[in-house]
Image (cartoon, coloured by chain):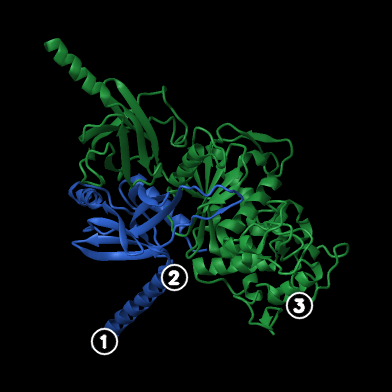
Chain colours: A blue, B green
Amino acid sequence: MKKFVFVILFMFALVLVNAASNANTAEKQGSSPQLTKVYVLGLKYDNGQLSKEYLFVTETMYENVRQAGPYEAAVMSSGKVRFKKTFSISTEVFDTEDTKGPFYYEVILPFYSDAQFITIKEKGKEKLKLSVSHFSEVISARGKVKTPPAAPTSSNPLIGQFVYFWNSLFKRS
Amino acid sequence: MRVLFFAVFLFMLGSVNAVFIQVSPPAGVPVTIFEITAEPTDSHGGTLSVDIFRRQSESSNSVFRRSRGISKPVFVQRINLYDDGLKGDERARDGKYIGVWDSIAQREGNYFVKLCENNKCTERDFVISNGCRLVNERDGIKKNAINVVFTFVNVDDRQIPVSGVDNNRIVLGVEEYNEFAMPLVDASNYGLLSVEPFKSTSNKFNFFYVNIPGHVSGFEAGETKSGREATQAITTLASSCPFENKIPIGLIGWKFRSRVSGGITFLSVDDYDDLVRLTKVYVHESGHSVGNIHDQYIVGDADMTRSNYDEFSEKLKKVCYYPDSPNKYIAVQQCLTNAPWRDLVGNGCGVDGVLDCLRARDPLFDVEVRCYNEIGCIAPNILTNTANNIMARQFEVNDLSWGRGFGQVNERLLCLEIIRRTGSVNSGSVCNTLCLPSCSSGKKCIEGRCT
């Protein structure tokens, strides 16, 4: 009986030690940045007019940088705001007299699978409304076809290399 | 009648002639959903089909080396572009067709999108790869940092000096982009990280380059058409580095006056015949792009009036002082009492708070904070905050003072922007010795404290 209790206690201790070790490892790795799926929206400001220059979806290390400004970008779904942020577009020039522009700004917003629109407001007034549902369609189609998991151990070496490459870039400084 | 119908049919086919195709981003990792835009000369609304091809590469290392003609491109996929006001298209039947292409699980390499109508084809290249590279990969990507992105436009086949090797020149190709960008940020020479406050806040900067060549039909600073093309090229290339807090830099193979416009830095590569000269220009432009600091050199010969000065931006008033009195002595006294940098006067050379340096004796004389009335700031009658600094005449800042060449007034403005953009600076930063944001009236910044 004593032997049985000892074995149980010993195994329990092993489990505790293992858990502590894993927690320690997780803590060390916990600060490694995560890749986030994002919309990358290029805007052009030209003679008072705001327009879309480009829009695509990719993955990157996303940091929501807070910035004050008259513009507000919002990701919309079913009429509700899923995410919004304010920003400003620099129209300043240095070492030149040319103040004509155009001026560009890139907004990075987190991707939402149910998003329908990205809106851009200037001082509360809507200036742009961009449909983004087609990106969601493409992303959801990924689930219907057999695609390799995005991990270094992936059966697809290219995806593995890609993730490995980004992870190597994102190592702690 | 049949002949007429056939002729009309052929005419309709020929009328859809794609003159513009754009792929964004020009380089994306293999999970990117690319956006493809086409503008035919005569649109018909509805749907337009384009084909995606992959160029065969000679080897896995030749991603950016064209292999056109060596082997036949491989057809990848046919996709539809829409001008229906839906599916990402802003307005129906406006002649702009838009579609997306998912690159997941595709091979790295050179790709192109091809649109053919009536035997007339237009192609646009793009790349699946990581076009965004760190200038110094061992640094890794730092969080909460300002992301500087170097792009290259019209620099194909230019001969440039190899850094640190006299009379040894290389032909600039994509593989040399990193070598090209490295001296601009080099901490051991005149690069950005050799100068405060960048030096002691280097953990707040990531430096990337985009290894995709950009091309525009020409570039003249101030010339609207080519300026627009170059701005668009730099912006699109920099989108390969999808980071917030981004400062795009365009290194352009054209002769023009380097400048910052709308947050984008335009650097003339023609100055690269002298590596040090180009690097010093880049550091000056970084004062603009990072710190929003006004130029402090003479722009015109005529004196500035009070109303002209007041019309200028608030940025000018932070670094240049307009005196009410034409008397030089009184003007200096007014400045010492009222200038925004009054608490830093005497700092930067010798004892803090004391104007104790001489030009003939002290190498740091130029960057000692003062109210200087001998060179002018934009106009001859405006006082400067130092005898010289990187935002005034960067080529004349001597080597011994280069590391503090911005002067403490500009360093303070840079620090405030670095903190605003990134949230903080580390305790060892020079920013912690500059009494941010400034000392209250009557107090001076002595050894980093307002007293």
Report, in whole angstroms, how far the alpha carbon at label 1 lies from the one at label 3.
Answer: 76 Å
What is the three-letter code of the residue carrying label 3? Gly
Q: Position of residue B209 (x, y in %)?
A: 52, 47
The residue marked by circle 2 belongs to what chain? A
Depth check: give the residue in front, B135 or B340. B340
Left or right for B87, reference A158: left
| Quarter of the image that includes the N terminus of chain B | top left
Q: Name the residue nearer the viewer: A115 or B390.
A: B390
Q: Are marks 1 and 3 in contact (CB under 8 Å)?
A: no
**CA separation, marks 1 and 2?**
35 Å
Question: What element does badge 1 sit on?
Answer: helix
Q: Quadrant of the C terminus of chain B?
A: bottom right
For label 3, the crowd category at 10 Å Cα-Cα, with few meaning under 14, some 14 to 19 and many 20 or more, is many
User: In this rendering, is residue B316 above or below B427?
Assistant: above
Corner quadrant of residue B349: bottom right
The quarter of the displayed image where residue B255 is located:
top right
Mark 1 or 3, which is nearer the eye? 3
Where is mark 2, residue-wise? A28
Number of dots carrying numbers: 3
- Residue B116, compared with residue A129, is above or below; it is above
**Residue B239 placed where, x, y %?**
42, 49
Crowd class of label 1 (few under 14; some 14 to 19; many from 20; radius 10 Å): few
Spot the residue most to the bottom: A2
Secondary structure beneath disc 2? helix
Chain to which mark 3 belongs: B
Q: Which residue is mark 3?
A: B353
